[in-house]
Amino acid sequence: MTTTASHSANPPHRRPVLGGHGGVPEDGLRPAPGPEGALPVGGGPWSVRSVRPGRGRAALELYQHGELADVLVAARLTPQLLRGARRSPSGSGRSFLALAWGRLPAGGRAPAVEFTGRRLLGRVRCVVGAEVATVGGEFWLAWAEGPVDAVWVRCGEAAERLPLERVRGPQGASAGGAA
């Protein structure tokens, strides 16, 4: 399923903006760790904030445990779809919450995203379909829960794979995304 989140509800510049959360699932909204205006995503320790300045390019800020983990800036010069991917233990501790993010391709259509992994002591390969949301018409986010350790992103003929970076906790959280 693809939903659209146009931008944050409370932009940092305090100027009024058009639109709202634009289809973020009702159960996806909760108080977000991070700066004012950040929207929670994926049920894990992540939140995002979309910044669309009056001049310049749009940007997406990704927060992990309330601290800035990555910033994407709108750019059409790179064909890269997949910017980064992380996983965090779920509340039960038996599976993982996974998050992947990137830039939309030139056509603006959200890519197909699948998280992959193994279950039953690594003997059975599994594929977990992702919930995908577009943000600000420039970026996408995808999340899922399951025994996952990598993500595949496909759009037309282009396909990219990235292993999921482990998230340990607020003190052990690493900063930066996959370039």
Image: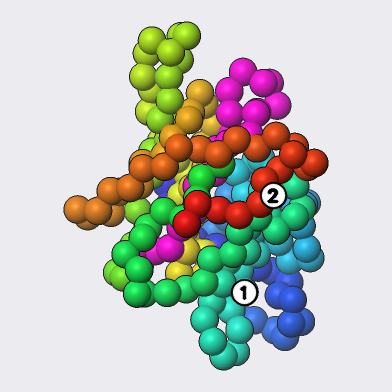
Picture quadrant of residue 75: bottom left
Above or below: residue 58 compared with residue 166: below
Above or below: residue 168 compared with residue 13: above
In the picture of the structure, the residue carrying the numbered disc 1 is: 51
Where does residue 24 sit, x and y in percent of width and height? 57, 55
Where does residue 58 sit, x and y in percent of width and height? 54, 77
Q: Residue at x 65, y 37 (%)?
A: 167
Where does residue 66 sit, x and y in percent of width and height? 77, 53
Earlier sequence position, callout 1 versus callout 2: 1
Left or right of residue 65: residue 131: left
Q: Nearer the viewer, residue 18 or 104?
A: 104
In the picture of the structure, the residue carrying the numbered disc 2 is: 64
Left or right of residue 79: residue 1: right
Is residue 67 found inside the magenta-colored segment of the image?
Answer: no
| Dot 1 alpha-carbon crowd within 10 angstroms: few under 14, some 14 to 19, many 20 or more | some
Q: Nearer the viewer, residue 17 or 49?
A: 49
Q: What amino acid is at disc 2?
A: Gln
Magenta stretch? 87-105
Q: Residue at x 65, y 28 (%)?
A: 90
Where does residue 144 sit, x and y in percent of width and height? 51, 37
Q: Secondary structure at mark 1?
A: strand
Picture quadrant of residue 170: top right
Q: Secondary structure at mark 2?
A: strand
Q: Which mark is residue 84?
A: none
